[in-house]
């Protein structure tokens, strides 16, 4: 009998990708589905970045790229971190990977031993817990509900730390909630972490520029944590470059060297053409970033206003990213057309098959009472999607 490895058998499939796939299957049958399940800007990559990629092709950047990334890209990232974040790094502390997803996984595989504990605030991005499993670590989940804006407190963090704690994964602005930690909130967490010098912090900042709260704050700004913080970022969200697959870490040198060693054995360097485009994204005109952020803010306000008109939906107002994460447990136990809604996964499937709107059940994010909607689509689609959601929910009793 053919049997996959225990390592693979322990992993769960990505529910966000699964819902997107189901949405595509219904569309292929001719059904008009509005997809609010995928975390992807609907904008096109800005022209000056595309031009850089075309030039790279014409200039014959068609050979293997260096494992940690081209020198000009890493220098551009160093410049970005200094200019935008006030953080000092050298180019050899930057490792460029095939998207921020690989950057997170590289880091965990480089630092986590079997049985090491990794603290993950919930709601969390679906892949964090699976990556920890892959590294044979143990997930320690801290739940923060909607009543605390989905953000953990210093007391919760302190209570989760044990002698086996190896790392903390922090994502701000957050996927799936859109919550943003303020400088004061990060300072509180930093004070706890300062007492535990063996904990490494993975700071996932991929949504940095989709931030409606003002200046982005990184936990790496606290000097007592800088030498054990790995900043993870990339071009996917800020520059509408999801398919280009460029992410990076800015890390203590020993972690950067470890990730370089690991990456050299299983993917080597990222796409040469995408790297040349990313260098221009980081070093070039940034006006496109602000324009997209303004559009996302308008869409957030529109969708929040529309969803608040639906009874039974409990909603906070997220300060970043492009997600809404309402509490929908008021609908659990209700039925329509012979189907009963037991949990958020049932409700997501009901909205897809009856309302023809794709969302993702919160169970995949460690929050089984919630649904994740992405508002990274047109205003017209959002208005129609919420109309369908309202109609489908009204049929439940």
Image: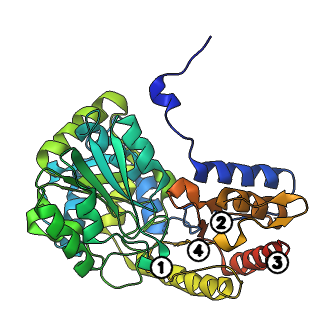
**Mark 3–mark 4 contact, CB under 8 Å?**
no
For label 4, the SS is loop
Numbered label attached to residue 318: 1
* 374 relative position to 212: left or right: right
Q: CA distance from mark 3 to mark 4?
A: 17 Å
Residue in view at x 68 percent, y 80 percent:
312
For label 2, the SS is loop
Foreground: disc 1 or disc 2: 1
Sooner in the amino-acid sequence: mark 4 or mark 1: 1
Residue in view at x 80 percent, y 55 percent:
27
Foreground: disc 2 or disc 4: 4
Q: Which residue is mark 3?
A: 394
For label 1, the SS is loop
**Mark 2–mark 4 contact, CB under 8 Å?**
no
Q: Quadrant of residue 342?
A: bottom right
Q: Which residue is mark 2?
A: 36
Rendered view: 34 above or below 160:
below
Crowding at label 2, few (<14), some or many (≥20) Cα neighbours within 10 Å?
many
Q: Which residue is mark 4?
A: 326
Rendered view: 222 above or below 114:
below
* 212 relative position to 204: left or right: right
């Amino acid at each position: 009998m053919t049997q996959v490895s225990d390592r693979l058998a322990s992993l769960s499939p990505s529910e966000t990708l699964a819902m997107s796939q189901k949405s595509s299957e219904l569309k292929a049958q001719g059904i008009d589905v509005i997809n609010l399940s995928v975390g992807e800007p609907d904008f096109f990559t800005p022209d000056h970045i595309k031009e850089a990629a075309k030039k790279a092709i014409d200039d014959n950047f068609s050979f293997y790229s260096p494992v940690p990334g081209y020198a000009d890209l890493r220098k551009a990232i160093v410049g970005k971190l200094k200019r935008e974040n006030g953080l000092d790094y050298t180019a050899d502390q930057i490792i460029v990977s095939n998207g921020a997803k690989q950057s997170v996984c590289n880091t965990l595989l480089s630092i986590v031993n079997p049985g090491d504990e990794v603290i993950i605030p919930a709601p969390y991005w679906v892949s964090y817990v699976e990556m920890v499993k892959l590294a044979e670590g143990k997930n320690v989940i801290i739940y923060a509900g909607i009543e605390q804006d989905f953000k953990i407190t210093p007391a919760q963090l302190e209570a989760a730390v044990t002698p086996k704690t190896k790392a903390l994964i922090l994502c701000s602005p957050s996927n799936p909630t859109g919550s943003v930690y303020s400088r004061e909130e990060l300072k509180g967490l930093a004070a706890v972490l300062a007492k535990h010098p063996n904990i490494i912090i993975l700071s996932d900042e991929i949504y940095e520029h989709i931030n409606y709260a003002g200046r982005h704050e990184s936990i790496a700004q606290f000097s007592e944590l800088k030498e054990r913080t790995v900043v993870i970022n990339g071009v996917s969200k800020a520059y509408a470059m999801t398919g280009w697959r460029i992410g990076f870490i800015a890390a203590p040198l020993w972690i950067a060297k470890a990730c370089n060693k690991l990456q050299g054995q299983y993917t080597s360097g990222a796409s040469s053409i995408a790297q040349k485009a990313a260098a221009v994204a980081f070093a070039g005109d940034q006006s496109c970033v602000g324009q997209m952020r303004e559009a996302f803010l308008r869409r957030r306000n529109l969708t929040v206003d529309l969803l608040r008109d639906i009874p039974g939906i409990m909603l906070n107002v997220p300060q970043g990213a492009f997600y809404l994460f309402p509490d929908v447990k008021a609908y659990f136990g209700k039925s329509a057309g012979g189907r009963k809604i037991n949990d958020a996964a049932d409700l997501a499937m009901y909205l897809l098959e009856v309302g023809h709107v794709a969302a993702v059940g919160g169970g995949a994010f460690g929050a089984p009472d919630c649904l994740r909607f992405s508002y990274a689509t047109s205003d017209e689609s959002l208005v129609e999607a919420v109309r369908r959601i309202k109609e489908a929910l009204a049929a439940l009793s």
